[in-house]
Image (tube, rainbow, N blue to C red):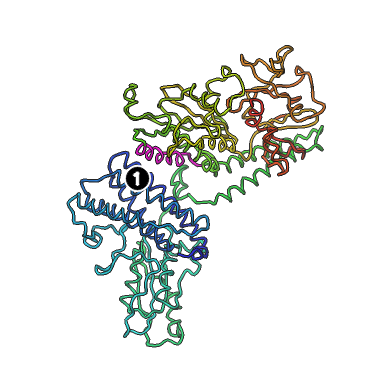
């Protein structure tokens, strides 16, 4: 396949990539679920067969030969299972084949999505699959050389069976199909055909395009309706209602031309007729043929008449929550991003109107009422846009099944994955970034946490370990908990590695258990002495922290030796618009996300003291918390030096509490996070800032990042 062949049809490529990825994800989950059950249920066999069959046909139309042939090879296994119901089925081996095929296809689709040429070879996988199917038939007492598709075509359902070619010809994939031998004595013919696809096949416009792509090999010229198959949104409905109509000239005899069209996949019915036949055609269509075509276009399509319906009253309004599937549409994520940006700008504009300095001191009752209504509508609009972007986290959770399954086989361990709160909804952006951190944590639990079966048995535990993935919403955050019942972490071993890596910044006895366990997230940190396929290089867990922090979240880990480990991830539900508290420090204003503020208070005399190193500390709720003066951190003049006249805000980030000193709290406000200019972006790590926002009076306020600030204090 040439790379340019795909680039010419971007809408079709986009549909193909989306549909194929959906099918591949479905295949992986069905295979893993079947393996855990120990057998393939009939419904699952049908689903896997249909998914592979669809991928095969779609890839063939896209001229992705390696994907199409591999899908066909895997499809043969499930065709055999479906037709003969063999008694001996190696579910694990078949699952291996399916997952290997899924991995290859995902890789090729990723190349296509990146604008590259899918150039991988599936020859070895196909050879292994064919050999497995042959042995599979022998083990069940069947002849391995009998092709069931030819021997028992009647047993294949019309909705899901592959097209059956004549017995004397090999299976065809319809990838740049070779031109059939023409009937020499027949001359040139003009045909009209209407193709009706199966009702639930989907992608009707792509199916029609595939017909035209194949027709180039037999017809020098052809016409079709609807004309703009991929560009016209109504083309799909037209094809569904009246079929895909095509007129073409070819030197194939009528039976061969009809047979050529009947090989179209997902074809439910074909209407075929010959319009004209002549030995020579100076041009096409001739006036006579053109008149026939125009008459055919004007004529009512030859379709079965609808059943006679009796008049009935207008339908009643649907009950809320009914027939959701018919109301679903797919929307590009970049359009939702743009909509969210516009809502953010609207929030800023509304604040600039309602908090305009020109209104200070004025008693405007009607304006205040309208401003409250505007604020209410803005919040409803923001919630509505956010709900459009929210997706269940279950899809990301289920991908971890593959990690657990592969590692149990490779490491000789027994473990199962339990999912809790799969229906919890999070922002689409979060699901795209949380996958890698979850993968590394689950792999760490499998490799370091879950023990070998004999070790668990000796410790009085079940041979099969358990890893639990749980999610729930708490306020404006989503909380994800990853828990295992493995061997837990050894504090002394982690401290020993921390000493070797020179990570200790204070006396060892001052470190809490949570701080010690947090060392595993340091770059290059690993407690494994040997490098294995899954660990030992000291990479992976640091990715967890960096990805979570990029989402504005935090991660903590706790463990009990011999009983297991719990990793807790907290991420804001949205990163675009957040509630912030505006602080005044001297003549400057800063904004702090409200989600990190636990309380605010004015300290009493003697409540703030200096520790042995001269740092200001304050006792709060029985804890000794460090105090950070924003005026000294940012060099702001005019700030209050007497803390009893200032406001202290208790902030908690990454599980670490600290106090921020400000002169005054100006109130809360919804803020839209804007990036800081590039020339000062490098300073944000050293200053604890994350961006800026526009205030209601048009001024700019820098946004304090609680996590970065905590790292500054506890470094």
Residue 419 at x, y = what percent? 41, 34
Magenta stretch mostly in which secondary structure? Answer: helix
* 38 vs 200, nearest the viewer: 38
Residue under circle 1? 31
* 129 vs 212, nearest the viewer: 129
Q: Is residue 120 above or below residue 350?
A: below
Q: Is residue 109 within the magenta segment?
A: no
Q: Is residue 530 above or below residue 678?
A: above
Q: Residue at x 18, y 54 (%)?
A: 142
Local crowd size for mark 1, using a 10 Å CA cut-off: few (<14), some (14–19), many (≥20):
many
Q: Quadrant of residue 203?
A: bottom left
Q: Is residue 110 left or right of residue 348?
A: left
Q: Is residue 22 above or below residue 211?
A: above
Q: Is residue 125 left or right of residue 714?
A: left
Q: Residue at x 42, y 61 (%)?
A: 64
Q: Quadrant of the N terminus?
A: bottom left
* 715 vs 590, nearest the viewer: 715
Q: Quadrant of the C terminus?
A: top right
Q: Is residue 373 visible?
A: no
Residue 290 at x, y = what percent? 45, 81
SS for tag 1?
helix
Specify start and end residues of the magenta stretch as a single range. 391-410
Residue 540 at x, y = what percent? 51, 37
Q: Is residue 83 left or right of residue 620?
A: left
Q: Is residue 663 visible?
A: yes
Q: Residue at x 75, y 19 (%)?
A: 643
Q: Quadrant of residue 399?
A: top left
Q: Is residue 69 above or below residue 419?
A: below
């Amino acid at each position: 396949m040439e790379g340019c062949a795909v680039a010419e049809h971007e809408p079709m490529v986009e549909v193909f990539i989306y549909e194929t990825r959906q099918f591949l994800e479905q295949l992986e989950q069905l295979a893993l679920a079947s393996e855990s059950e120990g057998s393939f249920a009939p419904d699952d066999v049908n689903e896997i067969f249909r998914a592979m069959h669809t991928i095969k046909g779609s890839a063939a139309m896209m001229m992705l030969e390696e994907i199409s042939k591999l899908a066909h090879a895997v499809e043969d296994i499930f065709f055999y299972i479906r037709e003969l119901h063999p008694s001996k089925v190696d579910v694990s081996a078949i699952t291996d084949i399916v997952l290997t095929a899924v991995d290859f296809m995902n890789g090729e689709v990723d190349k296509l999505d990146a604008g590259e040429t899918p150039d991988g070879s599936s020859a070895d996988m196909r050879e292994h699959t064919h050999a497995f199917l042959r042995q599979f038939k022998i083990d069940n007492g069947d002849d391995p050389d009998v092709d069931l598709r030819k021997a028992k075509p009647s047993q294949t359902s019309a909705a899901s069976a592959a097209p059956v070619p004549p017995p004397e010809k090999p299976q065809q994939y319809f990838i740049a199909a070779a031109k059939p031998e023409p009937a020499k004595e027949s001359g040139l013919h003009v045909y009209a055909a209407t193709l009706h696809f199966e009702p639930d096949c989907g992608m009707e416009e792509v199916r029609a395009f595939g017909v035209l792509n194949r027709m180039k090999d037999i017809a020098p010229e052809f016409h079709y309706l609807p004309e703009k198959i991929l560009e016209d949104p109504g083309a799909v409905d037209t094809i569904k209602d009246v079929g895909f109509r095509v007129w073409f000239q070819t030197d194939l005899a009528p039976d061969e031309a009809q047979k050529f069209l009947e090989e179209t996949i997902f074809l439910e019915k074909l209407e075929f007729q010959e319009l004209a036949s002549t030995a020579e055609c100076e041009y096409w269509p001739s006036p006579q043929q053109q008149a026939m075509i125009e008459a055919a276009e004007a004529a009512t399509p030859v379709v079965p008449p609808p059943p006679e319906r009796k008049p009935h009253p207008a339908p009643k309004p649907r009950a809320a929550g009914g027939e959701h599937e018919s109301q679903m549409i797919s929307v590009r994520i970049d359009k939702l991003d743009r909509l969210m940006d516009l809502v953010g700008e609207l929030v800023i504009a509304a604040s600039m109107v309602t908090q305009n300095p020109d209104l200070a001191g004025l008693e405007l009752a009607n304006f205040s009422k309208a401003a409250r209504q505007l604020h209410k509508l803005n919040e409803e609009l923001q919630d509505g846009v956010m709900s459009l972007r929210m997706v269940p986290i279950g899809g990301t959770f289920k991908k971890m099944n593959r990690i657990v399954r592969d590692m149990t086989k490779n490491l000789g361990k027994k473990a199962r994955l339990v999912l809790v709160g799969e229906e919890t909804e999070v922002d689409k952006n979060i699901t795209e970034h949380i996958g890698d951190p979850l993968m590394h944590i689950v792999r760490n639990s499998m490799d370091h946490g879950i023990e070998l079966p004999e070790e668990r048995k000796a410790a009085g535990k079940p041979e099969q370990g358990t890893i639990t993935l749980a999610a729930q919403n708490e306020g404006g955050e989503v909380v994800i908990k990853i828990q295992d019942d493995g061997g837990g972490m050894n504090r002394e071993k982690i401290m020993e590695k921390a000493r070797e890596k020179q990570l200790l910044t204070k006396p060892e006895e001052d470190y809490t258990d949570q701080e010690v366990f947090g060392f595993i997230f340091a770059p290059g940190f690993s407690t494994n002495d040997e490098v294995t396929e899954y660990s030992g290089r000291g990479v992976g867990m640091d990715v967890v922290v960096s990805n979570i922090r990029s989402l504005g979240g935090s991660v903590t880990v706790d463990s009990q030796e011999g009983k297991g480990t719990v990793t807790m991830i907290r991420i804001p539900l949205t990163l675009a618009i957040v509630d912030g508290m505006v602080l005044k420090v001297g003549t400057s204003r800063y904004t702090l996300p409200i989600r990190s503020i636990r309380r605010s208070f004015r300290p009493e005399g003697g409540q703030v003291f200096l520790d042995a190193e001269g740092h200001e500390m304050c006792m709060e709720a029985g804890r000794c918390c460090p105090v950070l003066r924003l005026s000294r951190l940012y060099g702001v003049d005019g700030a209050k030096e007497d803390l009893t006249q200032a406001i202290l805000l208790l902030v908690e980030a990454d599980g670490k509490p600290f106090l921020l000193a400000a002169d005054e709290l100006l109130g809360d406000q919804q803020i839209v996070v804007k990036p800081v200019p590039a020339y000062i972006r490098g300073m944000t790590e050293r200053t604890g800032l994350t961006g800026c926002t526009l205030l209601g009076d048009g001024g700019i306020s820098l946004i304090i990042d609680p996590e970065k600030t905590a790292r500054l204090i506890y470094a």
